[in-house]
Structures are given as structure tokens and as C-alpha cells.
Amino acid sequence: MLPCCAVRTCHVLVLVLCLSAAEDFDWTKNDRGSFYYGTFPAGFSWGAGSSAYQTEGAWDQDGKGLSIWDVFSHRKGKILQNDTGDSSCQGYYKIKEDISLMKELKLDHYRFSISWPRIMPTGIKSDHVNEKGIKYYDELIDNLLENKITPIATLYHWDLPQVLQEKYGGWQNISMVNYFNEFANLCFERFGNRVKYWITLNNPWSVAVEGYETGEHAPGLKLRGTGAYRAAHHMIKAHAKVWHTYDTKWRGKQKGLVGISLSGDWGEPVDISNQKDIEAAERYVQFYIGWFATPIFHGDYPQVMKDFIGRKSAQQGLGTSRLPTFSSQEKSYVKGTCDFLGIGHFTTRYITQKNYQSGHGSSSYFTDRDLAELVDPRWPDPGSEWLYSVPWGFRRLLNFVKAQYRNPMIYVTENGVSEKIMCTELCDDWRIQYYKDYTNEMLKAIKDGVNVRGYTAWSLLDKFEWDEGYSERFGLYYVDFRNKNKPRYPKASVQYYKRIISSNGFPNQREVENWKRKATETCSSSNQLLAAEEQRSTAANILRLIHDPLTSHMEMVTEVVVPTVCTLCILLSAVFLMFLLRRHN
């Protein structure tokens, strides 16, 4: 189980950490040594995660209000293949089934998010509190605890109530600070007697940049050069207010912890002997995780962000920087509002210096950084186009956080890899390799002295992947989205991750090498089961096709997503059968 210290002890720890001097991170030292056999500290917590919009489905059921993702995904052309999260994994109806999967994995904790519009349909408490939504999360939390799985609840995983977007402009408006605090306070009141680990915001970088700068994510705004910075500013203030609300009103009786989950790719200098590359790499990391972590730990934005954005704003002829400022009172209020730091990490980039000219209308978050991102073509990339497997970057990032923020308590809140393949494949050896290598680099970081307390595999299930729809799969468990019941099937990585958890690490070379062989053996029976189910599903589609060729064909095109070789054979047979029937008629 996750350790939860008494309040006084935690405050003493924070005081000691604040008095200790921050270390300097050594950019020139990159130890990419061999695999390390050893175990994690006693009490290390192993888990898996999900989020409400990506897995729950039931988008308009039991009084739930609209979220910005409900609206965004229903706009044609916004999501690949026009997919939506309307039903996704149907997790809303499968609490006990999914918890049985967690038990099979022997998880210590499960990270999930609470849908704001499921609890408050308009986002405003005085309008309405949806008791059916409260009941759903009560049932989820109670079932987790009954099965000795610690709940970690995220308050905001991107599903802002649509009413707040339409009425106020969402995170562009300072009023979100109070509305979010009102929602968080209700969650503390109703769930805080059982939930002891709270995450205020998940990956605010994506919310700001992809929601308000590039428009790739909901709400889909393209406010270049200003939108991301304004949204981030308000989210940092919202996080701080929620932390203070818990600290003053709930901590004494509930004895919980409140943190934030920040995503950060690692940026490695192309040439570690080139000072400009080193500076560019540090800028990359500061503009990413430092954008949020530095105010929360030190009270203000990274100096390099203030310098670069301020200079480019002046070059544009603007009277003030496009990066908002904190007042001295706000700096004090924001600083120290983190009981633990959640880190989501997936990949790494090589970074080099690149100058962008500032001009009217040409500014953006990306050009403000004056850098170029590169990848090594030898890095494995089995799934998402942005996700390359670079395990050593994980250790580098964790050590950077240790040096920059005086070694805070860290929980890894997201880490995993996707697949994007034409055929269904449960024997996911690339994911086994990814988890093996990344968790081992985390173990090395702990050996370096980094204060990592837990790890969350991302994700428990295949799910809706935002603008990529269902084309990419991160899950340990395969979900058959074509089947209305959304059945789950274990991938080989389930057995492998389960063995890492059971051994609390990597005991010895011989045993670890056996894990992969055993995991691959167990997945073949699941593959056969899934193939048989696909054949039954496809056969049903064929019967509809014969009965009503036009309508059924349209339905089948939307339902058959990733056919196996067996299914393709059946489809070819169906075409041939149609041809014979038409000739006969």
C-alpha cells in the first residue's frame, strides 16, 4: 500500500527539503550502463491508470452533463475516423469486472479521474449536483478498497464542463479557479474519507498547448502565442487554490496528500560538449515540465521562460510579455503547494539550438523556445508517431527533477507505450521490452537517490486516445471496441508486469529472462480466443450484409477496426459469396 505519513511529519520533511540547497544537474554525464538487477524499496507501490473520458463511456447517461470532449469529438474531422468516447470501454458499467483485472495484476493502487460534468453537469455547484454521478464514484472507490487497492483520484483529466467553456471561455478565464476549487471541495467532502491521494490536474501542458494553442485537442482553440500561457497561468492558480483548500479545511481530519501530475519528455543535447546545445536542451525541459513545476516549487516561472518570451514579445512591439506574471502575493501562495509530484513520462528528444525570428502574428509557444527537436532513427517506435522508446531518458528526467526541486516525493503517474498495427496481436513483446527497460531505469534513478515512491503503468485498458481515436492502443488489456460489450483480453505484458510487481523488481538475470518466455506462452491462448470471437462477430456482420447489403455494409465498415488475418479471410469469403448470390439472382 501507499505510505501516508502524518501531517506533522510531512510538514517537517518539507521544511528540511526547503532548507537544503538545490543541486546542479550535470548535463555532460549520461550513464547508459547495462541492465541493473535488484529490487525496489519495501513499500514501493505498483499500479495502473485510466481517465474518465477515455474509459467510462455513458457520455449522456444518469444525469451527466456535456464536457468539452463530448462536443469536440462530435465535430466531424476533429478525431481520426470521427471516433468519439461516447461508449469507449463502457467502464461506467464494468467496475467489478475491471477491478478483477487489477486483482489479477496484483496492483497496489489504481489511478482514475473524476468526471467534473458527471458530478456537476454544468460545472457549477449551485446549478445542480448529480447524485447518480457521486454514487458511481462511491461504488468504484469502495470496491477498490474492499480489494485492498489504493485509489488515486485525479480531479481534472481534461473533461471541462462544456457550459464553462461556452459561458466563460474555459481556462482562458480566471473564473475557472473558483469553479474548479468548488468542484474539488465537493470531491474532498464526499470522497475524502476514503481517498487519501489526490491529483489536481493531469498534464496541464497538453491542456494549454494542444487545447488553446494548436487546437488539436478540446476545446480546439488556436490562440497562438498567448492562449497556452494564459490557460497555464490559470491552471497553476487553480491547483494552488485547491491545495490550500485541502490544507486548511480537510487535511487535519482526512490525513491525505494533494499533488499534481506533470508530463515531461526528456531533452538531451545533441552534443554534450556544445554549450548552446546544453542550453537548448535545458530550455526544452524548462518550457515543458518546468513551466508548471518551477512556480509550484519555487514560486515563479523558470527564468529562461521569462527571458525568452519577454524578449520576443518586445521584438514584436508588445508593451508587456505574452507570459503572464505572478504578483508577490501570488508567488507566496503558489510556492510549496505540492505534497508529492506526479510525473508522466513516455519518450525523449535530442535538442539543438535553432533561432526563430519574432514578428507580428508569427509567435507561438514552439518558436519562443528557439530550439529544434530530433530523433535517432534507431530508436524503436511501435505505435504513436511521437513515442520512441528511449529508456535512459527516464532516468535523466528523474535526476533532473531531483536536482531542480530538492528531491521531492515522486509518483510516476503515467508511463507506457502504444501500438499501431494492422492486425490484432496480444503477444506484445515490444511493450514487455518497454516496461522492462523503463522500470529498470527508474530503479537506477532510485539507486541515484531519487525519491520515487510508486509507479503507474499507462494504461490498464486500451481506450479512446484523444485526437487519434481508437487507432492507438496503450492498454495492458486489449478491448474489443467492435463488440458492444467491450470484452477485455490480457496481453502478454499483463503477465510480465505482474511478475515485476510480485518480485518488486528484477531479482536475477535467469529469472527475468524466463518471465518473457512464460508471458508469451500464455498470450497465445488469448489470441486464439480473441480470433474466434472476431470470426463470430464478422460472421454476424456478413449475415447482415447478405440480408441488407447497403445498410449492413455501412455498419460493418464502422465496426470492423483491426481485423486479424483470419477475419480478412472471412471478409474475402463474404465478397465472393455476395458475387455468387448476385449471379444466381
Image (cartoon, rainbow, N blue to C red):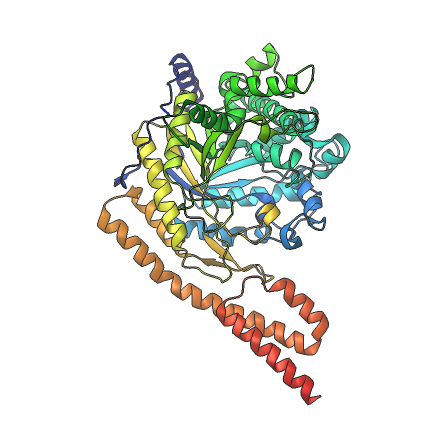
Name which residue lies at 29% across and 31% down: 447
User: Which residue extends farthest top?
Assistant: 328
Asked if residue 317 can be seen in this view, the reply is yes
Name which residue lies at 38% across and 14% down: 21
Position of 529 with respect to 320 (left or right) is left
Name which residue lies at 72% across and 39% down: 162
x, y percent for residue 30:
33, 31
Query: Closer to the camera, 386 or 433?
Result: 386
Query: Closer to the camera, 284 or 140?
Result: 284
Name which residue lies at 66% across and 40% down: 218
Q: Quadrant of residue 454?
A: top left
x, y percent for residue 496:
35, 51
x, y percent for residue 559:
62, 63
Q: Quadrant of residue 214?
A: top right
| Image mark count | 0
Position of 517 with respect to 132 (left or right) is left
* Residue 233, placed above or below residue 35: above
Asked if residue 258 can be seen in this view, the reply is no
The quarter of the image holding the N terminus is top left
x, y percent for residue 106:
39, 48
User: Which residue extends farthest right?
Assistant: 167
The quarter of the image holding the C terminus is bottom right
